[in-house]
Image (cartoon, rainbow, N blue to C red):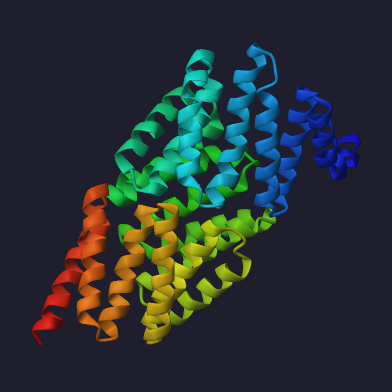
Amino acid sequence: HCAQRLEPVLGPLGYHHSKAGNAAAAVAYLVRFAALAFRAHGVGEALAALEQAAVDAERLSEEQRARASIEIVLHQALCLAFAGRFVDLVDRLRQLEGRLAALADPRLEGPFHFWWGFALALLGDLRAAEQQANHALARAELCADRRITAFTRGLLSYLCVFSGRFELGVRYGEIAAELLNEIEDMPEVRGIVWLNLALNHLMRGDWQEALSATRRAEAIGHAADSYRLQAMAASTTGYVLAHVEQWELALEAGNKALSVARDPFTFVQATTLIGWAQSGCGQTAEAVELLQQVVSQLELHGMRGWSVQARVRLAEALLQAGKHAQAECAAAQALEIAQAIGDRIGTGHGLHLIGRCARALEQ
């Protein structure tokens, strides 16, 4: 009860102690306030508090400083991810790698390398992401950290989608989901595990199992009152429906996702789906305009992995609109990025679209 009474003043207390030079108290209060702000959908507030906590941590004793700075960046990771600041996240982790090595604590190494792999996966550096994920898994298993073991297997499941290892991706996802039965915190990451499992089910042809997995993620989102996870679950549901050409339902799911999207990460996921579904529904002009904006946003955030799919959907919409040369250009860009990052699914889509564009230009 005392902790609950403190919640409304955690932020003011943290900033007060910061100004007063009480570094240890400032860090403790600001980190707690950031967690509350994030849960209340305030990524900006959470990041601001954690930035101040990081400054205050540098005033701690040498023994305390390294551990506090690592713990703070692990709190920052979730916020930076949903803000779409993956380049920033990788830079911060790289700067602290030396401190992490000096601590030699697998309880910190597991989550540190998990988030590094997570960020690299979204930036499209899939090989390096898998290396970080395997490192995270080894450290998590060393100290019996079930949560990071589950999260990392979920990340490996996601990476399997791009490399075409769908059966392995399902196995990773199922193991992760089983481990998560006893874990209640970080609902967004727990939900992402189910959504990655859904993608592997879909890619191996079992779209109904995929929808079952997205419903599990949606349930976690509602139980935790997480708009972020609700948006991701709705977008992934729409993605599955679009694959089986249930365009009206896919568009409905996309609009549902957009209605609860609060961050750049969930917003761009929802708008990519909406553009694809609009194209499927024959709303070609709207689809082209929206997908061009999505591609620009993904470029801004350096999210090469997602930009492949956005460019593929843009090429399809342009082709449908009769803009064959522009479609061929978008497809060629998708193919180039997909081949560079090792995305086998994107490579296949790119090649297929270039062939369709060539036929259309000949005709």
Residue at (59%, 58%) from the top-left corner?
A: 263
Residue at (57%, 62%) from the top-left corner?
A: 231
Tell me if 220 is positioned left or right of 324 in this view. right
Whole-percent x, y for residue 102 in the image? 50, 13
Residue 41: name its quadrant: bottom right
Count the marks. 0
Residue 246: name its quadrant: bottom left
In the image, 65 versus 354, the foreground residue is 65
In the image, 221 versus 209, the foreground residue is 221
Whole-percent x, y for residue 110 in the image? 50, 27
Tell me if 58 is positioned left or right of 12 in this view. left
Residue 16 visible: yes
In the image, 115 versus 197, the foreground residue is 115
In the image, 104 versus 250, the foreground residue is 104
Q: Is residue 132 above or below residue 5?
A: above
Residue at (75%, 36%) from the top-left corner?
A: 30
Residue 190 visible: no
The N terminus sits in image quarter: top right
Residue placed farthest to the left in the image?
Answer: 362
Q: Is residue 220 above or below residue 30?
A: below
The C terminus sits in image quarter: bottom left
